[in-house]
Amino acid sequence: MTHANSDSFPNDFPNDLPNDEVTADEAVTRQQLIATAYHEAGHAVMAVSLGRTIQKVSIAPGKSRFGASRLGHCEIKKGVKKGSHDRLEDDVLILLAGMVAEAKLTGQYCQQGAGQDLRDVANLLCTRAASPRQHETLQRRMLSKTEHLLGDDVHVEAIREIAQELLAKTTISGRLVRHYFHQAQQRKR
């Protein structure tokens, strides 16, 4: 997993300040923030599209449940809003969606940034795969399905709008995520 198709999102990496006022470190930090916004928006859009309820989405730095640093977070409420045909598959798609959405922007998978997501995917898939080869095949299949689903025009637009809102406000409610998702659905009909 090293490359992704980056034609879905425009290049949102411009600096807000004139070039003479932006240091190299500030430019890198801004790029990381934008990538994080797309990553978290990807989780949120996939979750909403699968019937999950989002509590909030944030690109504020913080700590994970195990104390490690994290750049953002998509908090999903417990339970499923509508019946899922395969809860484990849905969980894997949601976990992979962050890395896929970010890669559609940057042109490559950031496995380091998605490290915890990928570890969680591996743990979930080990319950379905009897061998390492089956595990790898299943993970590739799930990644391909995630790329396909997030390549849909509705998902692309919703991710873009949610990412822009995250960049403006840092944290947004699940209600606002649903609003942007439904708005994108209405425009693409």
Image (tube, rainbow, N blue to C red):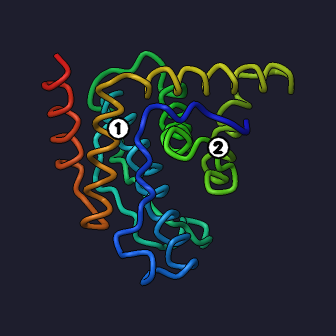
Looking at the picture, tell me which residue is in the foreground, 14 or 77.
Answer: 14
Quarter of the C terminus within the rendering: top left
- The residue pinned by badge 2 equals 109
Quarter of the N terminus within the rendering: top right
Question: Few, some or many C-alpha atoms within 10 Å of disc 1 (few <14, some 14-19, many ≥20)?
Answer: many
For image coordinates 41% across by 56% down, the residue present is: 37
Q: Earlier in the sequence, mark 1 or mark 2?
A: 1
- Select label 1 or label 2 by which is in front: 2
Q: Position of residue 91 (x, y in %)?
A: 50, 34
For image coordinates 86% across by 21% down, the residue present is: 133
Q: Amino acid at mark 1?
A: Val
Query: Is residue 181 rendered to the left or right of residue 63?
Result: left
Looking at the picture, tell me which residue is in the foreground, 116 or 39.
Answer: 39
For image coordinates 41% across by 52% down, the residue present is: 12
Q: Say if 79 sits above or below 166 in the image.
A: above
Question: Few, some or many C-alpha atoms within 10 Å of disc 2 (few <14, some 14-19, many ≥20)?
Answer: many
Query: Is residue 177 rendered to the left or right of residue 126?
Result: left
- The residue pinned by badge 1 equals 45
Element marked by disc 2: loop
Element marked by disc 1: helix
Where residue 109 sits, quadrant-wise, is top right
Q: Position of residue 182 (x, y in %)?
A: 17, 32
